[in-house]
Image: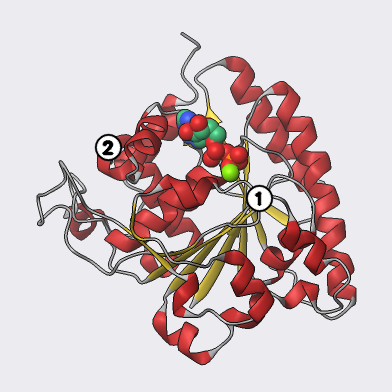
Amino acid sequence: MIVITVVATKGGVGKTTIAANLGGLLRDLGLRVLMIDADVQPSLSRYFRLQHDAPNGLTALVTSGFLSADCMSTVQLPFGAYKDVAKYPLLPDIKLVRSDTREGNLQDWLAPRLDRLVRLSMPLRHQNVQEQFDVVIIDTQGALGYLQDAAINAADLLVSPATPDVISAREFIDGSMKLIDRTEEAANLGLKVPPMKAVINRLENTRDSRVMSELIREDFMRLKGRVTVMRTVIPSIVAFKKAATMQVPVHWIDPERAGQVMHELLWELIPSLAGRYAPNHPNPGQQACGGTEPSPLAIQSEASSTAPPQ
Ligand SMILES: Nc1ncnc2c1ncn2[C@@H]1O[C@H](COP(=O)(O)OP(=O)(O)O)[C@@H](O)[C@H]1O
Ligand SMILES: [Mg+2]
């Protein structure tokens, strides 16, 4: 079982979008997915429709230290217009631990506890959880806090989206520095600091956006290898918003562009999945002749980001 936590010290950079879409794609690849909404604002909890809304959520998970059945809601996929079972097959349901701590009570509960850093990793380490799921995706809030610390500490891998605009880029580097310093304090206490992968999200086809994207890459070099910037870049694509409105993963709405990028992102994060496509992918057979080379579509999307501004 692998735990991926999506973090950033800023809101609106695409954490929930990436968490929900990675979860949806992993499910379509046949993996058993648990999503945990560790944001005080319950955005991931609302991304998908629920087939079963469990009575409890994050608070019970963190305070009891167990992932009991009454904390796990069930996502409803597929539904409605997506009835083509060959393309949208009935696969294992995504389980979701809803955020239910709007008033921030959980942060207050965590504050005085010596074991606050392990309150999320602990329940996930149980053997029955390890056997029940292949991947856990944790979404977090865009601010430093005890809940975020616990979510980082539970992760095998951190994914941190950065948007390449002038205001965000600087804030992103400063925020990431703070985040890394904070996690390294935990490391001094003998706790795990997972590798952090930054992903440039919402790249616009403009000169400014590309300059900022390069600035982020260069600034990260100064973080002395503590963060790597991912090769996969997520362009700004309207399908992401559309997918969120329709409560489905983006590769259902736009398999060729957004879907391809999400596959590339997932493969870069979990290389053992490289070449595996969701059943609705327009050309799932291309791996047979394409080997392990990046697909033409991926090269195209990178190339298009260097085209002159329109
Ligand atoms: N690559 C993208 N292209 C277009 N819109 C995006 C992209 N990524 C995120 N968005 C949109 O940006 C907004 C903020 O994203 P969200 O995932 O909620 O950010 P966060 O969780 O970091 O606050 C949402 O409306 C989402 O649909
Ligand atoms: Mg969010």
Which dot, 1 or 2, sits closer to the camera? 1
Near-viewer residue (254 or 110): 110
What's under tag 1, amino acid-wise?
Answer: Arg
Q: Residue at x 28, y 59 (%)?
A: 28
| Res 102 label | 1
Q: Is mark 2 within 8 Å of ligand 1?
A: no
Closer to the chain start, of discs 1 and 2, is 1
Where is 146 relative to 201, above or below? below
Q: Residue at x 83, y 49 (%)?
A: 177
Give the percent coordinates (x, y) of residue 205.
Answer: 49, 19
Give the percent coordinates (x, y) of residue 231.
Answer: 53, 46
Give the percent coordinates (x, y) of residue 239.
Answer: 36, 31
Q: Residue at x 16, y 55 (%)?
A: 285
According to the picture, the residue beneath numbered tag 2 turns out to be 253
Could you give the CA–CA distance between mark 1 and mark 2, rounded to whole angstroms?
Answer: 31 Å
What's under tag 2, amino acid-wise?
Answer: Ile
- Tell me which corner region of the image, top left, top right, bottom left or bottom right, holds residue 50: bottom left
